[in-house]
Image (cartoon, helix red, strand yellow):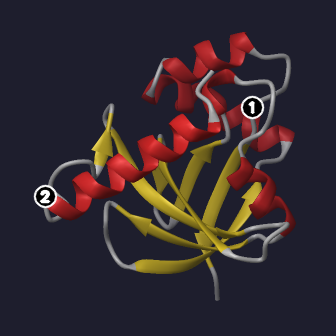
């Protein structure tokens, strides 16, 4: 599993590629749209930014996967949005939009999970590595 430092380095490199290329390199990864998710730190109260992929985009709803590479612990960004679901999302290096994050219900996850794995087989492999059920998060526009 990647360490916290490795994840921070990957985020920094991804953001730098987007910036240097004017958004041409890094706005999709493995065929999935990339996005920058801004959450509010549950302990610090500070804005925290994470680069993620979106295996499913249905209209205004974006689905992200709290996999952390199949680690047994949830990613920090997931814990943050679980405590404060008001987030900001920049999809494919576009403008930030205010969104609300909700964790998929068991019924929603059952419907979405096969589509997630179809978009990127690695998510299925990540689920096999861990005993926790990897959460799916739905990001929808805030009114």
Residue 33 is situated, as x and y percent measured from the top left of the image, at 36, 48
**What residue sits 78% from the left and 39% below the top?**
74
Q: How many marks?
A: 2
Q: Secondary structure at mark 2?
A: loop
Sort mark 1 into few (<14), some (14-19) or many (20+) by Cα contacts within 10 Å: many
Name the residue located 15 percent from the left edge and 55 percent from the top edge.
24
As measured in the structure, the alpha-carbon distance from the residue carrying label 2 to the one carrying label 1 is 32 Å
Q: Where residue 20 appears, x then y in whole percent? A: 16, 60
Q: Is residue 75 left or right of residue 28?
A: right
Write down the quadrant of residue 38 in the picture: bottom right
| Viewer can see residue 53 | no
Q: Kindly tell me whether residue 135 is visible in this rendering.
A: yes
Q: Is residue 95 left or right of residue 120?
A: left
- Per the image, the residue denoted by label 1 is 134
Residue at x-position 44% and y-position 78%: 96
Q: Marks 2 and 1: which is nearer the front? A: 2
- Residue 37 figure quarter: bottom right
Residue 62 located left or right of residue 131 = left
User: Which residue in the protein does label 2 denote?
Assistant: 21
Q: Nearer the viewer, residue 123 or 59?
A: 123
Residue at 23% across / 64% down in the picture? Answer: 19
């Amino acid at each position: 599993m990647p360490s916290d430092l490795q994840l921070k380095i990957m985020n920094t490199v991804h953001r730098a590629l987007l910036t240097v290329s004017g958004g041409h390199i890094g706005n999709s990864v493995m065929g999935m749209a990339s996005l920058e998710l801004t959450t509010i730190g549950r302990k610090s109260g500070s804005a925290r930014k994470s680069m993620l992929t979106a295996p499913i985009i249905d209209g205004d709803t974006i689905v992200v996967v709290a996999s952390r590479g199949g680690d047994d612990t949830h990613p920090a960004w997931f814990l943050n949005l679980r405590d404060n679901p008001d987030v900001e999302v920049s999809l494919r290096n576009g403008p930030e939009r205010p969104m609300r994050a909700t964790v998929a219900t068991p019924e929603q996850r059952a419907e979405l999970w096969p589509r997630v794995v179809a978009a990127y087989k690695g998510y299925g492999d990540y689920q096999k590595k861990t005993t926790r059920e990897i959460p799916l998060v739905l990001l929808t526009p805030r009114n």
